[in-house]
Image (cartoon, rainbow, N blue to C red):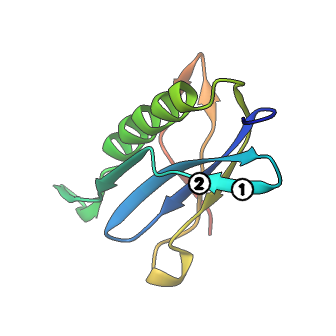
Amino acid sequence: MTRGPALVAIDLGAESCRVSPLQWQAAESRIRMAHRFPVRPIVTASGICRDLDGICRELMVGLRRSAEIAADGIARIGVAGWAGAGVTPATLRETAGELARAQMLG
């Protein structure tokens, strides 16, 4: 029997991303991959880049699946990214309920 809300791990890999809820059963942790999807580049007028809109859509699929798995809800979400793979760090902000474009730091 699980107790309490789940923790959700999001791994933003260079070639694929994973969304996995972690729950406790008795004294042991249990992690299950809820969603995995490929990261595909897109071509824009300024060059080849990551499809941020596509990544965000797929992350929402993973979070919804995680919520279905976690009967007691989700307490926290942790995100690990591909910072070592030559990607410029970005911050995301929410505007009027919609995810805004990445705002590049630098």
On screen, 51 above or below 3?
A: below
Residue 91 at x, y percent in the picture: 62, 52
Image disc number at residue 31: 2
Residue 63's label in the rendered image is none
Is residue 26 shown left or right of residue 68?
Answer: right
Q: Is residue 56 above or below residue 42?
A: above
| Residue 55 x/y as whole percent | 37, 47
Disc 1 from disc 2: Cα separation: 7 Å
Q: Which residue type does callout 2 highlight? A: Ile
* Residue 69 position within the rendered picture, expressed as x and y whole percent measured from the top left: 54, 31
Q: Tag 2's secondary structure?
A: strand
Q: Determine whether label 1 and label 2 are within 8 Å by CB.
A: yes
In this view, the residue in front, 53 or 16, is: 16
Dot 2 alpha-carbon crowd within 10 angstroms: few under 14, some 14 to 19, many 20 or more: some
Secondary-structure class at tag 1 = strand
Q: Quadrant of residue 18?
A: bottom left
Which quarter of the image is occupied by the N terminus?
A: top right
Task: Determine which residue is flagged by label 1.
Answer: 29
